[in-house]
Amino acid sequence: MSSLRFLRGEFCFRGVLSALLIFIFMGSFFAQPRAEIVENKKSFGSVKRGEKVELKYELKNTGNSPLLLLASEVSCSCTQVEFSKEPVAPGKSTTVVVKFDTKSVWGRQDRYVYITCNDPKGEIALRYKGQVSKE
């Protein structure tokens, strides 16, 4: 009879241990970064053709694992994007700098920059707009 109690105790211990391991695994499985953009739309106002505009966007990782900014995509060669390749720890922020050279454009400008990252959404869209005069 004592061996039967021992076996029940062992099975109970294994069950608790298995449940604990599954909980730990699932917790790490659901650990994800979350990119939150403080202000994803910016206006540079009115500038003269040939001026260079610099816009800064703050990104915060509100998730529970490191956020990685991997690549950027722009609509024209007049736009450059700079950001750190270092992981953004949970609760921390980083800055993405968008540089727009107006020497080859004029008129109303409304453009997007896409940042590929490991957020479950896959990418972040940043928008900027303004007016470029011909003179």
Image (cartoon, rainbow, N blue to C red):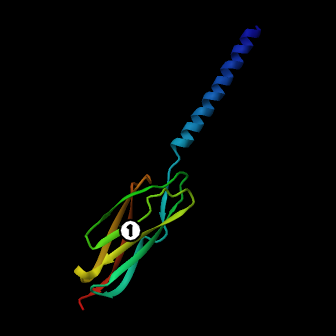
Q: Quadrant of residue 54?
A: bottom left
Seen at 27% across and 68% down, the residue is 75
- 61, above or below 41, in the image: above
Give the percent coordinates (x, y) of residue 118: 43, 52
**Residue 29 screen position, x and y as percent:** 51, 42
Q: Quadrant of the C terminus?
A: bottom left
Q: Position of residue 11 (x, y in %)?
A: 66, 19
In the image shown, does 12 or 51 lie closer to the viewer?
51
User: In terms of depth relative to the viewer, which is nearer, 50 or 27?
Assistant: 50
* Left or right: residue 76 compared with residue 46: left
Q: What amino acid type is highlighted by mark number 1?
A: Leu
Q: Residue at x 57, y 60 (%)?
A: 91
Q: Which residue is mark 1?
A: 126
Residue beneath the point at 38% across and 82% down: 44
What residue sits 60% from the left and 28% below the top? 18
- Give the answer, above or below, for where 8 lies relative to 63: above
